[in-house]
Amino acid sequence: ETRWKSNGVCYVNSDKEKYKQFWNGQNTAKNGVGIFVRKQLAQEVLNIKRSNSRLVWIKLRLEKQTMIIISAYAPQTGESEEMKNDFWAAFSDTISTEPKSETILIGGDLNGQVG
């Protein structure tokens, strides 16, 4: 959860590396997700999809394959069933529309619950 407003792309410097950041948020400082890509790989980003303030993905070309990287922040306990259902529907749509030959990497806070 980034809690950043709106969405965008920017470069971020660390001590030794430079990264391109892709993020998605909303008008209030709530929710929000992002993905950092090393500058050298940023030119290989083929597509960015921002479904809502809880889901963003990039499609990245890596040598002979394409990888989809998803950053997700699922609604937590206490949120409405409608919000949870909307999130999981968008998440499912994102994954199911991509070719099965592409690698999908999922990261984030999926707010799982046991029991």
Image (cartoon, rainbow, N blue to C red):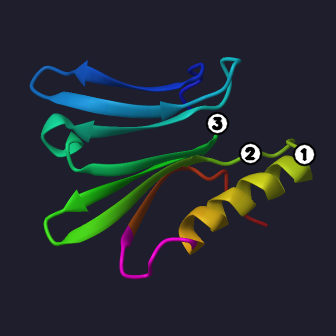
Which residue is the site of mark 1? 80
* Secondary structure type for disc 2: loop
Name the secondary structure under disc 3.
loop
Q: Do the residues labelled 2 and 3 touch (CB within 8 Å)?
A: no
Q: Which residue is drawn at 65% across and 31% down?
A: 31
Q: Is residue 52 left or right of residue 80?
A: left
The stretch in magenta equals 97-103
Q: Give the dominant element type of the magenta stretch: helix, strand or loop.
A: loop
Whole-angstrom CA distance, mark 1 to mark 2, is 8 Å
Mark 3 or mark 1: whose residue is earlier in sequence: 3
Q: In this view, does 98 lie to the left or right of 79?
A: left
Q: Nearer the viewer, mark 2 or mark 3?
A: 3
Q: Which residue is painted at 72% across and 60% down in the image? A: 88
Amino acid beneath label 2:
Pro
Labels 1 and 2: the sequence-earlier one:
2
Quarter of the view holding residue 20? top left
Q: Position of residue 54 (x, y in %)?
A: 63, 42
> Label 3, on which residue?
53
Task: Give the CA separation, mark 3 to mark 1.
Answer: 16 Å
**Residue 18, position in %: x, y?**
17, 27
Residue 113 visible here: no
Q: In which quarter of the image is residue 95?
A: bottom right
Residue type (three-letter) at the residue carrying disc 1: Ser
Q: Residues within 10 Å of mark 3 (few under 14, many from 20)?
A: many
Q: Which mark is residue 75?
A: 2
Q: Nearer the viewer, mark 3 or mark 1?
A: 3
Picture quarter with the N terminus: top right
Considering every residue shown, the one lying at the far left of the view is: 16
Q: Position of residue 62 (x, y in %)?
A: 19, 62
Residue 45 location (% of width, % of height)? 29, 48
Seen in the image, is 8 located left or right of residue 31? left
Asked if marks 1 and 2 touch (Cβ < 8 Å), the reply is: yes
